[in-house]
Amino acid sequence: MKHIFAIGVGGTGAKCIEALVHLHACGLLIDDDGNPARLGVFLVEPDQQSALLVRAQTAINRYCAMSRAIGRNSDLFGRAELRDYGQWSPLTTSSGAISLDQVFPKAVLRTQAPGVAALFDCLFPPEEQRADLEVGFRGRPPIGSAVMSRINLEKEAQVGQWQQMLGDIQTAAGSGEPPIIYFFGSVFGGTGASGVPTLGQLLKNWLKRQGLTSIQVQASLLLPYFDFDGMADDDTGVHAESRNFQLNTDAALQYLRSSGKACFDRVYLVGSDIKARYGFSIGGTSQSNAAHLVELLAALGVRHSGKNSGGYAHVLSRAKPQAVGWEDLPDDEAVGEALARGSRFAVAWRNNFSHEIGDAQKVSMSTFLSGAPWAGKFFHPAGASLSTGGRPGIRDKEQLTVQSAIDQYCDTFLQWLNQIASNLGSGFRQELFSADLLSPSDRFEYSLSRIVQGKARPRRPESADTVESIKVQMDCLPSQSLPHRGMAGLADCLWALVV
Amino acid sequence: MRNLQWILLAACVALGIGWIFIAQNWIFLNLFPGLLVGPGLNLTNFLQTGSSPAFSVFWFGCIVALFIWIFVTSSASPRSSAQTRQMQPMWWLAAALLTLFGWLCLGWFTIFQWQVSGTSPEASGPNFYPVPPGGWFILMGFVLIDVLLLFWLPTLLASPRTYRLVVPGAVTLLGGR
């Protein structure tokens, strides 16, 4: 089994992890034999209140909850393994320090190493020394680098999340195919730009010391792809400024050019010349930047085996200057089919089947069945619990728990897809999804033909591309072809039939 | 519609034709002559010019209703099971109207057409067929049986897609399939 350990650093890193979780849910992370890979995710972020971190964690939690609820009652849907190593802040190593002058106590430096204290004053102006880092490294890579460089991975490997993850890396390295460690982060902000190369180098050194040199350390590094709308006020203090993005990027790329191989075995560089616009935020709960296609592309780097291509840095381009289509995505056939399956499933489930299950709670099972013959394949026709044939009752508490878990994950997935499809720069369009259909609705969705656009849309007549057609197909399936019943069996069957 | 449903529909129509035009008259003539025959009523004559035309027209009405049902359910686009179930009252309405239509056909060919034309179906008899009360009971009962055979059975077996179980009794009879 293939093991992937993904580490998201900073807000953009967290957004890439969110994208990766959704790609994993769509079955896009597989080994050479087509079996789902085991994905472990870890979020590194000093800003523990970050809305981006919360959103990534929500996606992780909801997928894990759904996968747990489904258990082994499904063949394809929700079977991808996801291990959550949680969140970690580099500030936790600094004995509760929340500013640079607490991380490097100036009073101590002045008495013990006056030269270093002077250098410290020279490198960091007073406002950077005093800045509260609980909202992140404020778009300043030098601040992040100073904090990150104090991380002692040997020490961290003894406790907490690092211990769990590094232990699992060692175990995975000893069981067949060497695992991949994959970093995500921006090179134009603060946390990612400083954290990704530093942690990459620390981890590579640690692997060397452990004799685990077969393990690849790779990274998707995000180049500028958004700008800020609005400005900070006078009270904001040190903050990220989009005018610094290019400068930060240049510095990061120069560093990678000279020292990149000490940090990563391979990097994927992805950005956008057409920038999305986000409202200004210093960090914390107000930083709710919508998901972006660039993060999806960054996450797709994990799929690139690199076996057939040499080189250190990989870049992407698109065919049309003002639009992006399926053809612009790497391995577009497989990626298109998987995302089409995921998006169509989420809409069909959340905006039709889930409402149907809700309807079934209000009427007798025989009344419900008279309008929903497909339901008899998965639930007991008399509504009895755990009957012969393994069909549970449609009102069983466990079944409703599974439904709720799938609903919640679908909500998260649809929100992400909707943002991917609608959060574009000015004058730029995407030809992947219809954004207006990618949201939970109380209305029963009927047609599925418009959800996915372009070549990834299933090739079937529009009139037959409906939820009702899927229900009819379900009803026609012979019982022996349905290995799983109940809510998980229904979801699994829908997953198989929706594309 | 699935192939099997087309076959069942054709079989039901064929069965209905055999029932209406052959079996039913045989039953009237051989099993219920005592109830149908009354003073001044020639049963053979009544079957030829009274009940047979009435049941023929009624059969045609059932076939029309059946194909309207199949057309409507085949071409509908129900978004939900609740929308599918909305066809259930339509089915009951169709079945009730067909029953009424059957009784009206019997009334027309037994009584009203002679009254309107002012003629008598029997030589020197009244200008209607004097069917005894027991005969009316049998004839009206057969209209109900015919609705079951000509409308309920084919709609039960051949309702397409998600309408497969919307016909009354379908969940009990076919729900476990």
Image (cartoon, coloured by chain):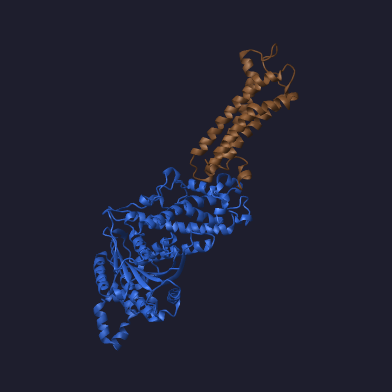
Chain colours: A blue, B brown
Residue drawn 59% across and 45% down?
Answer: A367
Count the labels in the image.
0
Is A392 on the left-hand or right-hand side of A436? right
Please give the name of the residue rendered at 57% of the width and 35% of the height, measured from the top-left corner.
B10
Compared with residue A459, is residue B70 higher up or lower down, i.e. above or below? Answer: above
Q: Position of residue A344 (x, y in %)?
A: 43, 52
In this view, which residue lies farthest toward the bottom? A112
Give the residue at the far top of this rendering.
B124
Residue A406 in view here: yes
* Along the line of sight, the residue nearer the viewer: A144 or A432: A432
Q: Report the residue at 61% width, 48% height from top.
A: B176
**For residue A254, side relative to residue A499 (left or right):** left
- B94 vs A354: above or below: above
Q: Where on the picture, by quarter, is residue A146?
A: bottom left
Residue A215: x %, y % from top left = 38, 74
Q: Is residue A131 visible?
A: no
Residue A386 in the image, given as x and y percentages of width and height: 62, 57
Residue A292 image position (x, y, % from top left):
34, 59
Q: Is A16 left or right of A64, judged from the image as shown?
A: left
The quadrant of the picture occupied by the N terminus of chain A is bottom left
Side of B5 where A110 appears, left or right:
left
Judge by depth and name the residue closer to the eye, B153 or B72.
B153
